Image (spheres, rainbow, N blue to C red):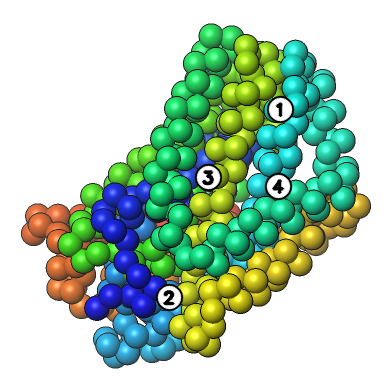
């Protein structure tokens, strides 16, 4: 059976699209500042462990579910559950994912708007010869300017809606094929700059030295949530992409490639940014503004920095776009299936809803910065935390349980083409290690019990 929305041309096209979804602001903007806020190396190690033990098995499960169901995540879960005689309540995985996609896109598009703005600032030579104080002031002036932020946010949303309305495959395949390798290349340029002119040794120590005392239960939860976020799992985005995957492709090795590429981009971003942060007296725990201070500083002091800097932000905005597209695909595919709606109309409805939601994030940085939903959380902090720390891990948890305990083992093994000797490893990962780790990390962060940290 084929999906009514089409099929990827081949394995490589899927790798490009799924990597396009995984690699985005999560790697380049979020990973560095979360590492900075959560004590460096300890956070990085937990994040890597979560990718390996929780993220990869769940990603494999998600792609497989998609390919077996061949529909939007909601309908895929419904039809598989019908086939296997399970409750239709399992489709709640799909519904939760749709909600998570809306919430994430609402703030994702705001930050992507910042990227667009910075692309123009750098191109105009705004940061040539800049120092730490100048970049910090530029950032706070910008975030204080509501109309400017609204403008870029709205523009990014319009671009996203335009592209998703045309279908994921037309354009997307071609687009990621060029943009991703170029982004990699420029990340290496930045890394080179950082090695030569930043405090590289200190950056490496910060990122990789494990000190258990730095680790709070909150940091562990953040690291796990980030593993979900960065791989685009737990909400059906990868399931939707999996539903367009040709039958012959090996899911396990393909997911391996995507996870490695995604992790590499995050680590390179961290290695490029922290040396610049340390040499220029920026604060590693500067929060969401970290990237917008470190990168302009680097390019502002490089020969032809305006050109390369603008190109860098352009490619990051491409990376953000390919992720944004996948955030709405579960909802979009569902609207098309259920209401026979045109992609364009579905895209406009989704885009508009996310735009309205996103206004809360825009205001979190200025007029509503003192408005706190719970404790000291602004609207942005709140939507970010709820989606990343609760919705995605919980969605992933349900996916793991479903594949491990609600589907015939033989069907799973055949679909994944697992060799006999690997089936035990797979069963242990998807049935025990992944779901149990999620539960332990959740309970631990709620203070139900105390481990060493
Ligand atoms: N993985 C994307 C990033 O790291 O920027 C964000 C994302 C995309 C999360 C799609 C979730 C998702 F479904």
Q: Is residue 239 left or right of residue 166?
A: left
Is the residue indicated by label 3 positioned so its CB lies within 8 Å of ligand 1?
Answer: yes
Determine which residue is flagged by label 4: 113
Q: Earlier in the sequence, mark 4 or mark 3?
A: 4
Extreme-left residue of the structure? 420
Crowding at label 3, few (<14), some or many (≥20) Cα neighbours within 10 Å?
many
Frontmost residue, 37 versus 176: 176
Residue at x 59% of width, y 31% of height:
311
Determine which residue is flagged by label 3: 319
Point out the image quarter for the N terminus.
Answer: bottom left
Determine which residue is flagged by label 1: 122
- Label 4 close to label 3 by CB (< 8 Å): no
Q: Tell me the SS state at disc 4.
A: helix
Residue 40 appears in the rendering: yes
Whole-percent x and y of residue 413?
17, 66
Whole-percent x and y of residue 403?
30, 71
Whole-percent x and y of residue 100?
58, 66
Is the residue indicated by label 4 positioned so its CB lies within 8 Å of ligand 1?
Answer: no
Q: CA distance from mark 2 to mark 4?
A: 28 Å
Q: CA distance from mark 4 to mark 1?
A: 14 Å
Q: Is residue 435 left or right of residue 269?
A: left
Rendered image: mark on residue 72: 2
Residue at x 82% of width, y 21% of height:
134
Residue 385 appears in the rendering: no
- Label 3 close to label 2 by CB (< 8 Å): no
Q: Earlier in the sequence, mark 2 or mark 1?
A: 2
Foreground tag (2 vs 1): 1
> Total label count?
4
Crowding at label 4, few (<14), some or many (≥20) Cα neighbours within 10 Å?
many
């Amino acid at each position: 059976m084929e999906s009514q929305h089409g099929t990827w041309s081949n394995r490589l096209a899927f790798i490009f699209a799924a990597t396009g979804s995984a690699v985005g602001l999560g790697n380049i903007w979020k990973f560095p500042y979360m590492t900075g806020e959560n004590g460096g190396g300890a956070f990085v190690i937990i994040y890597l462990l979560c990718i390996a033990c929780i993220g990869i098995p769940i990603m494999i499960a998600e792609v497989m579910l998609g390919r077996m169901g061949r529909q939007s995540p909601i309908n895929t879960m419904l039809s598989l559950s019908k086939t296997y005689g399970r409750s239709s309540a399992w489709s709640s995985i799909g519904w939760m994912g749709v909600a998570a996609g809306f919430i994430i896109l609402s703030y994702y598009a705001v930050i992507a708007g910042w990227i667009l703005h910075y692309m123009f600032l750098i191109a105009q030579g705004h940061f040539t010869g800049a120092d730490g104080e100048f970049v910090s002031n530029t950032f706070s002036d910008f975030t204080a300017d509501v109309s400017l932020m609204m403008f870029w946010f709205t523009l990014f949303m319009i671009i996203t809606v335009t592209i998703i309305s045309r279908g994921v495959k037309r354009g997307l395949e071609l687009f990621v094929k060029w943009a991703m390798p170029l982004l990699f290349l420029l990340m290496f340029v930045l890394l080179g700059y950082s090695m030569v002119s930043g405090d590289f040794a200190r950056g490496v120590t910060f990122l990789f030295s494990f000190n258990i005392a730095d680790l709070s239960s909150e940091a562990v939860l953040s690291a796990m949530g980030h593993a979900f976020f960065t791989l685009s799992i737990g909400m059906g985005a990868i399931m939707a992409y999996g539903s367009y995957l040709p039958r012959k492709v090996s899911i396990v090795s393909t997911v391996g490639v995507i996870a490695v590429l995604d992790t590499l981009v995050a680590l390179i971003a961290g290695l490029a940014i922290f040396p610049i942060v340390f040499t220029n007296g920026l604060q590693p725990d500067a929060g969401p503004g970290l990237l917008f201070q470190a990168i302009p500083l680097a390019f502002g002091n490089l020969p032809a920095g305006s050109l390369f800097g603008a190109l860098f932000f352009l490619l990051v905005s491409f990376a953000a776009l390919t992720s944004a597209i996948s955030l709405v695909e579960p909802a979009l595919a569902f609207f098309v299936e259920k209401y026979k709606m045109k992609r364009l109309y579905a895209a406009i409805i989704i885009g508009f809803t996310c735009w309205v939601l996103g206004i809360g994030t825009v205001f979190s940085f200025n007029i509503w910065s003192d408005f706190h939903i719970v404790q000291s959380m602004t609207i942005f902090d709140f939507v970010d935390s709820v989606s990343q720390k609760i919705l995605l891990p919980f969605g992933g948890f349900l996916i793991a349980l479903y594949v491990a305990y609600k589907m015939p083992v033989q069907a799973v093994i055949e679909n994944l083409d697992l060799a006999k000797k690997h089936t035990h490893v797979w069963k242990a990962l998807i049935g025990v290690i992944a779901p149990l780790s999620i539960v332990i990390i959740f309970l631990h962060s709620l203070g139900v019990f105390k481990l060493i940290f």
